[in-house]
Image (cartoon, grey):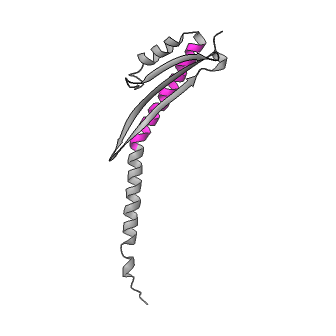
Amino acid sequence: MKTHRKQERGGAQLKFLLVMAFLGATAYAGYLYVPVAYQAYGQKDFMQHCVDVASAQGYPESWVVGQVQKNAAEFNFPADAVVSSQRRDNRLELTIQYSKPIEFPGYTYNYEFDQTVKSSAFLTFK
């Protein structure tokens, strides 16, 4: 009644190693990428707060750029970030652009941060 299946020996071990290698690589990539994406979310929230305050208080566009530059270290904006602000359709817009390299083994991914936030229409100072 015994059947000899010599061809199938070790098949489960190889599949297990491949799956574990894939899960490990995915976890490591997430470990490197998630903090950068979370930091970008905080930066965008700070940008939105700045344009809303400037719009509600009637501050000029230069005040928003000054706030971003003043708090650049706290929110980890790089020194080479391009910061611009303008008024369009009675709303204040703030744009920040920079690139941040994320180094994986054998590959470098350039995370492009290019966000534009607009002040809320109901906060516009008239």
Which quarter shows the N terminus?
A: bottom left
Q: Quadrant of residue 23?
A: bottom left
Whether 11 is drawn above or below 75: the answer is below
* Residue projecting furthest to the bottom: 1
Q: Residue at x 54, y 23 (%)?
A: 48
Residue occupying the point 40% across, 66% down: 15
Q: Nearer the viewer, residue 69 or 88?
A: 88
Q: How many marks?
A: 0
Q: Residue furthest left?
A: 106
User: Camera-side residue: 124 or 24?
Assistant: 124
Q: Please identify the quadrant where the C terminus is shown.
A: top right
In percent of width and height, residue 43 lies at 47, 27
Q: Is residue 44 magenta?
A: yes
Does 35 sit above or below residue 106? above
What is the magenta range? 31-55
> Which residue appears at 60% of the width and 20% of the height?
119
Is residue 41 shown left or right of residue 14? right
Q: Residue at x 36, y 76 (%)?
A: 9
For residue 32, side relative to residue 62 (left or right): left
The picture quadrant where one finds residue 33 is: top left
Residue 36 drawn in magenta: yes
The percent coordinates of residue 42 (x first, y second) are: 48, 29
Q: Main secondary structure of the magenta part?
A: helix
Picture layout, residue 50 above or below residue 16 = above
x and y, in percent, of residue 38 in the image: 46, 34
Where residue 29 sits in the image (x, y, percent)? 40, 46
